Amino acid sequence: MSAAGRSRHSPAFRWGLLLLLLTVAGGLGYALLTLPDQAVGLSEQVSANMATSGVQNPVTAVLINFRGYDTLLEMAVLLVALLGVWSLGSAEVHRRIDPQPVLSLLVGGLAPLMILMAGYLLWVGANAPGGAFQAGSVLAAAGILLLLSSKRFPVRLMGWPLRIGLLLGLGTFTAVGMTLLFVSGGFLQYPSNLAGALILFIEAAATLSIGVTLAALFLGGRPQAGPYR
Amino acid sequence: MIVLQWVFDIMMLFALLWLAWRALSSPDLFTAIVLFIAFGLVMSLAWVRLDAPDVALAEAAIGAGLTGALLLSALARLNDLADITHDRHKSAAGE
């Protein structure tokens, strides 16, 4: 259908499109060139407050501590996206064809390593690049490989265990935030002596939820609780 | 060394533009998805060159890996749908 699309548009349309694109490109280039040399950012404030953040990696400090609210809402967006996919229909958990032996063998070796890798990325996120989203996506990749390679994915995991896994990140994040609202008087205002532990706690739950959510998105529908219809 | 970095950056820039153009203009959806995944991987290299390793990790894992997997699974579903409608048309014509 796209092959026919090449001749569908008139030359005037294509030249108009080119003109439009050039205008956008020119505007972007102009905006980029007129940027002030010294951008007014918040990096100085971030580095000034790193000592109270509980972590050594400024990216993690911003994501979970200084702007934790944004990350909380991102988790909610992920969950809403999955609910949207689930509302479209159901998906079979079972493969219709047997997986190739090479794939099974490969996944048998790779999946444990990937889960270990996810744990490492989560842990190292406190003082180096890494963190919940990276670890969660590696976990999701392991989940997708398992979904692809197993003829019979344990169906009993698709009911309540799956739903608890989906909600764990957002639930933990909100629960910690609300507790802090009553204890220290501000939503997600960590006391600096507990900040590191709380951040790791939230990130661990978030990693699990992100992994489960992304792998569930790959299924493309609400998993059927029972076997084949 | 500086010259080498410039050469690498410029090559990467043109590779990105070329991959993006091919991914958009490819008539075959499977090819387009594979090109998109390749684009994501080169893009994560670009993030590394821009000193943003956090974004590079996210781009490689989510942008290239998971989005690619999601697109491929969507394509498989599209093909299933096309098969089903095709079969229906055939059986309707046969009766």
Image (cartoon, coloured by chain):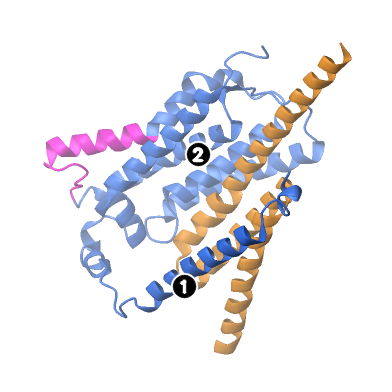
Chain colours: A blue, B orange
Residue at disc 2, secondary structure: helix
- Label whose residue precedes the other's in the sequence (2 or 1): 1
Q: CA distance from mark 2 to mark 1?
A: 40 Å
Residue A141 rendering spot, x and y as whole percentages:
59, 43
The answer to whether A161 is drawn above or below residue A121 in the figure is above
Q: Which residues are magenta?
A: A169-191
Q: Is residue A81 left or right of residue A1?
A: left
Q: Is residue A178 left or right of residue B67?
A: left
| Quadrant the C terminus of chain B occupies | top right
Residue B71 rendering spot, x and y as whole percentages:
62, 42
Magenta span: predominant SS is: helix
Residue A58 rendering spot, x and y as whole percentages:
33, 62
Residue drawn where x is 48% and y is 44% of the image: A136
Q: Which residue is mark 1?
A: A26
Magenta-span inclusion, residue A9: no
**Image mark 1: chain:** A
Q: For the residues tagged 2 and 1, is the chain the same? A: yes
- Residue A115, picture quadrant: top right
Q: Which residue is mark 2?
A: A211
Q: Residues within 10 Å of mark 1 (few under 14, many from 20)?
A: few
Q: Is residue A228 left or right of residue B66?
A: right
The residue mark sitting in front, 2 or 1, is 1
| Quadrant the N terminus of chain B occupies | bottom right
Residue B17 rendering spot, x and y as whole percentages:
61, 67
**Image mark 2: chain:** A
